[in-house]
């Protein structure tokens, strides 16, 4: 029998992706859709504008949206776990309320850096799920919260993980982030047409701090942060979907470009070994052309779950530099949440 799920923030950019990606999912089915008071008690089709290119499934359109509190969700259906796609400033107490009873797989930033809460990328740190029993005992919860990283962090860290074998010391990134990363309606058209905005609130802090926890070592009690220096500069660009990043890394070992390429190409993780339904065959795809990856052409690789890397070359100041691209609402958001939940299902957490 499929596990039944509630989506909190179901009407937003990420909530819509959850709905799209959960259609015909072999293990999970949507039971409850929840959003703000603006949407509650309305049919889904009468809430926010649907912004994806494939149509909203008709049965979803007819579902009534409920408030994001536990009583309203339980009245609407019996759920086994919860996906949270709420704004970071709202998610904190709401997710805690649900975690008393249910597993919560969160896309929001509220709990990401708390010591007893996993910050998970299934290919990178699946062993960090072992924090969950500690969290449940610390907080006396029957459920738990597991978080997924920021969208830019996810694609970056997937490429950093294979480089750890060469002694990763320093990372500098500059991002070109898509408009859907700001949700809907997001950035006003008159601010972004003919423009680049060199600031995204709290994005630099997230991309500098989250990788240290994800790439850290779980010692049986807590995660010891990775000893890497990261500097980040984040920009909003006039692209619909797909974040592109320039990445510059310093490695301890003398490493050739061929070795770096090989480490990216052969990188696989637990989701690939387990054959999880949303796992891409290749978490990293390397393009050899001098002008790739590009958001419009490469963001849908691996059904949006692969990170595409290109322009891998020597760096005259550090060691290596490259470009990487990830689909922000799939690998960076809903697809990441679903892959995390699939791993948790196999490991017996949900
Ligand atoms: N967009 C991305 O690429 C991306 C990537 C990674 C992570 N994230 C994170 O995912 C979360 C959702 O992002 P998004 O882009 O989907 O945002 P969004 O388009 O603005 O959607 C926000 C959702 O939260 C609901 N909501 C807003 N205020 C609420 C309140 N006071 N109480 C209950 N529900 C409320 C909205 O419902 P109404 O329609 O009723 O207002 C909507 O369903 C955020 O934490 C974001 O940082 C986003």
Image: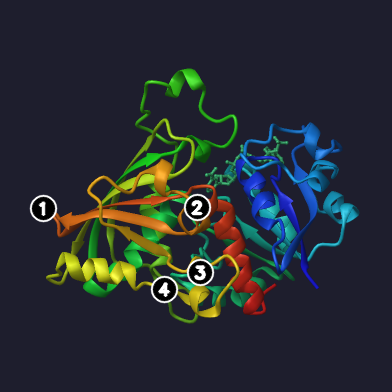
Element type where label 1 sits in the image: loop
Quadrant of picture, ligand 1: top right
Locate the C terminus and report the quarter of the image it occupies: bottom right
Label 3 to label 1, Cα distance in Å? 32 Å
Q: Position of residue 86 (x, y in %)?
A: 64, 45
Seen from this angle, which residue lies furthest bottom?
A: 220
* x, y percent for residue 155: 41, 56
Residues under numbered marks 2 and 1 in contact, where contact means CB atoms less than 8 Å apart: no
The quarter in which the N terminus is drawn is: bottom right
Above or below 156: residue 296: above
Residue 305 or 47: which is nearer the viewer? 305
Mark 1 close to ligand 1, CB under 8 Å: no
Tell me the residue that label 2 is attached to: 332
Q: Secondary structure at mark 4?
A: loop
Q: Secondary structure at mark 3?
A: loop
Mark 2 and mark 4: span between their CA atoms? 18 Å
Local crowd size for mark 3, using a 10 Å CA cut-off: few (<14), some (14–19), many (≥20)? many
Residue at the spot of label 4 = 268
Give the mark, 1 or 4, whose residue is nearer the N terminus.
Answer: 4
Q: Which mark is residue 317?
A: 1
User: Which quarter of the picture shows residue 26?
Assistant: bottom right
Label 1 with label 4: CB-CB less than 8 Å:
no
- Please tell me which residue lies in front, 220 or 345: 345
């Amino acid at each position: 029998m499929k596990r039944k799920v509630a989506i909190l923030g179901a009407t937003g950019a990420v909530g819509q992706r959850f709905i799209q990606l959960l259609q015909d999912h072999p293990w999970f089915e949507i039971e409850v859709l929840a959003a703000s008071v603006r949407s509650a008690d309305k049919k889904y089709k009468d809430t926010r504008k649907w912004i994806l290119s494939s149509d909203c499934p008709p049965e979803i359109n007819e579902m009534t949206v409920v408030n994001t509190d536990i009583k309203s969700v339980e009245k609407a259906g019996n759920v086994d776990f919860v996906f949270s796609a709420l704004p970071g400033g709202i998610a904190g107490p709401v997710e805690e309320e649900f975690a008393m009873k249910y597993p919560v797989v969160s896309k929001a930033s509220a709990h990401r850096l708390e010591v007893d809460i996993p910050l998970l990328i299934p290919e990178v740190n699946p062993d960090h799920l072992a924090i969950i029993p500690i969290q449940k005992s610390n907080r006396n919860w029957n459920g738990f919260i597991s978080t997924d990283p920021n969208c830019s962090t996810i694609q970056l860290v997937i490429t950093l993980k294979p480089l750890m074998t060469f002694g990763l010391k320093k990372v500098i990134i500059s991002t070109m982030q898509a408009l859907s990363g700001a949700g809907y309606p997001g950035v006003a058209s008159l601010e972004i047409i003919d423009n680049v905005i060199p600031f995204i609130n709290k994005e630099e802090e997230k991309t500098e701090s989250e990788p240290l926890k994800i790439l850290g070592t779980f010692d049986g009690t807590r995660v010891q942060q990775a000893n890497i220096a990261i500097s980040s500069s984040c920009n909003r660009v006039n692209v619909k979907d797909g974040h592109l990043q320039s990445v510059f890394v310093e490695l301890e070992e003398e490493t050739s470009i061929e070795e770096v390429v090989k480490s990216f190409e052969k990188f696989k993780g637990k989701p690939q070994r387990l054959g999880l339904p949303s796992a891409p065959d290749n978490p990293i795809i390397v393009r050899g052309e001098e002008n790739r990856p590009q958001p419009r052409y490469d963001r849908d690789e691996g059904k949006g779950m692969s990170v595409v890397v290109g322009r891998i070359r020597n760096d005259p100041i550090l060691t290596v530099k490259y470009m990487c691209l990830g689909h922000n609402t799939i690998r960076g958001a809903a697809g990441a949440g679903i892959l995390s939940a699939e791993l948790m299902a196999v490991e017996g957490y949900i």
